[in-house]
Amino acid sequence: QVQLAESGGGLVQSGGSLRLSCAASGSIFSIYAMGWYRQAPGKQREFVASISSGGSTNYADSVKGRFTISRDNAKNMVYLQMNSLKPEGTAVYYCTQYRTGKNYWGQGTQVTVSS
């Protein structure tokens, strides 16, 4: 049973920064790719960033150059550093662990960016 717990969300002004954290338990963390998604009110969940087991990263075009995903395999943690936040970044942010056939998801953390 995999458990993912996000933290670090909150209210920030436009142009500000936040660092999200995701703690994983119940699996051999280092062998799995991890990712961040977000879901704004009334919209579908969308991809934000991912990081492979080897550390290769991928980003949505909307966050390239502003967000950075990283992982610490010794601590079973994945992070999302978000800089230059925009009001359209307001959403619930979810951590996911990629598995064949079924991803695991956390409960999400709310990020609100005020204009």
Image (spheres, helix red, strand yellow):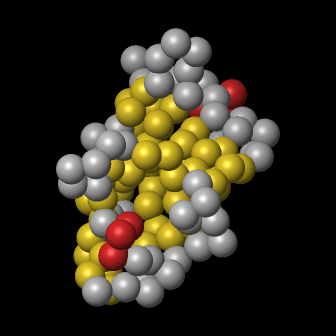
Task: Please state if 6 lies on the left or on the right of 22 as rendered.
Answer: left
Q: Residue at 71% of width from left, 50% of height from top?
A: 57
Task: Please state if 9 lies on the left or on the right of 75 as rendered.
Answer: left
x and y, in percent, of residue 52 in the image: 70, 39
Question: Which quadrant of the structure image shows residue 53?
Answer: top right
x and y, in percent, of residue 85 in the image: 44, 77
Up/down of 10 relative to 13, above or below = above
x and y, in percent, of residue 17 in the image: 45, 79
x and y, in percent, of residue 98 in the image: 56, 28
The answer to whether residue 27 shows anywhere in this view is: yes
Of residues 24 and 14, the one nearer the viewer is 14
Tally of numbered discs = 0
Q: Residue at 45% of width from left, 32% of height from top?
A: 25
Up/down of 81 relative to 83, above or below = above
Q: Residue at 50% of width from left, 70% of height from top?
A: 82
The quarter in which the C terminus is drawn is bottom left
Up/down of 69 relative to 47, above or below = below
The quarter in which the N terminus is drawn is top left
Of residues 64 and 81, the one nearer the viewer is 64
Q: Residue at 76% of width from left, 46% of height from top?
A: 56
Question: Which quadrant of the structure image shows residue 9?
Answer: bottom left
